[in-house]
Amino acid sequence: TVVDPSGEIAPAASGKAGGFLALDWNDYSPVGELARRSFQLHQQLADTLGADNIQYRRLTCASINVNPAVVAARPKGKKLEGVEWAQDGLEEGHDPVLGMRPLGDENTIAQVHPKRLCQNLWSAVSKPESDGGVGSQLIQGKVVGPVHDDEGKFVGVKLEDGSLIEADAVVFACGPWTANVMTGVKYHSVVIPTPRVLSQCVFFSGCGDPEVYVRPDSTAYCTGFPDGATKVTEEPGQEEVRPEAVEQIVSAVRLASGGSETGSALEAEPTLTQACYLPTTPDGLPVMGLVPESVAGGQSCYVATGHSCWGILLGPATGESMATLVATGKATPHVNLRPYSPEKYGAALHILESV
């Protein structure tokens, strides 16, 4: 059973993120093995759910250093070698690209449409058991806390309307709304139609450093210019979209890719504008594991949040790890959960308190 105040699946960042997946960008970091396991599971999910259904594909990625003064006035020219949709200037001194560095190819880079992934996963598990699902239910409501009996045994969760949902365990996975130690970093994003299907994601350096994640439906997800980390007061799925933030992104990607007068791949008007919060923690690591009984008030309360900009990448391995932990009391052999344990916050941790 999933309980969400919006009554929707993935109303916030899980449905609004870019869906960029990298196998090895987190190597030698505390989330390295989580990222590698998750990258593998994303491929398995695509094979199971259908790659086209979730817009999963392998592609390339590059970092492109651009000169804003040149791209604003450059003429059209030949295609720059190794850059799918940038061009060289024909005149000396009019080359907008100062440098290009490959960041990965089809062996290490992939993408998925986050909203489609979540919707397809939910469709699979919400089917009746006779149709191959498990009959999961989505309940619109707000959990105010766990309920335990006098001996500390978990009974269920209490909703804001006073009703009780009986269960064997609960996993709190509410992004920046999960606990008092959480903050959120607000990102705006736009989806821009492209003249053809592109297959190279780009991290621009210059023009404000926008990021462009091209998709297989001839669109590009563009983002950048994040707000600072803050306590989140906006409701999930109801995040304000500021027009000036949208215009900043659109202007930056147009300038970086050649300007609106040069046949740029990003000259079209956006078809979607949105905003969401990336859930962040004091140490920059996810919070995953069993909540201490002294904090939860009893047994069988778990938490999984704080994946920041890698939430979509790390999602499958997080789900696998938490499902195994809840069902067996043990971690999977693929991921060591100790660095993410909520125990590190001690008594300072308060679940479902934003401040």
Image (cartoon, grey):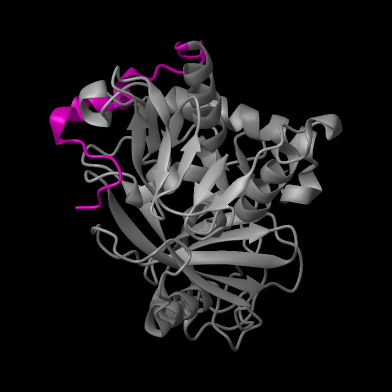
Q: Is residue 280 above or below residue 323?
A: below
Tell me if residue 101 can be seen. no
Query: Is residue 231 shown left or right of residue 84?
Result: left
Of the pair 292 and 318, the residue shown nearer to us: 292
Of the pair 342 and 45, the residue shown nearer to us: 342
Quadrant hosting residue 194: bottom right
Measured from the top left, where is residue 104 in percent x and y?
57, 40
> Which residue occupies 54% across, 82% down?
259
Q: Residue 178 lies in magenta, yes or no?
A: no
Of the pair 106 and 292, the residue shown nearer to us: 292
Magenta extent: 329-355
> Which residue occupies 28% across, 28% down?
342
Q: Is residue 139 above or below residue 208?
A: above
Measured from the top left, where is residue 298 in percent x and y?
30, 23
Query: Is residue 184 shown left or right of residue 26?
Result: left
Query: Is residue 252 shown left or right of residue 324?
Result: left
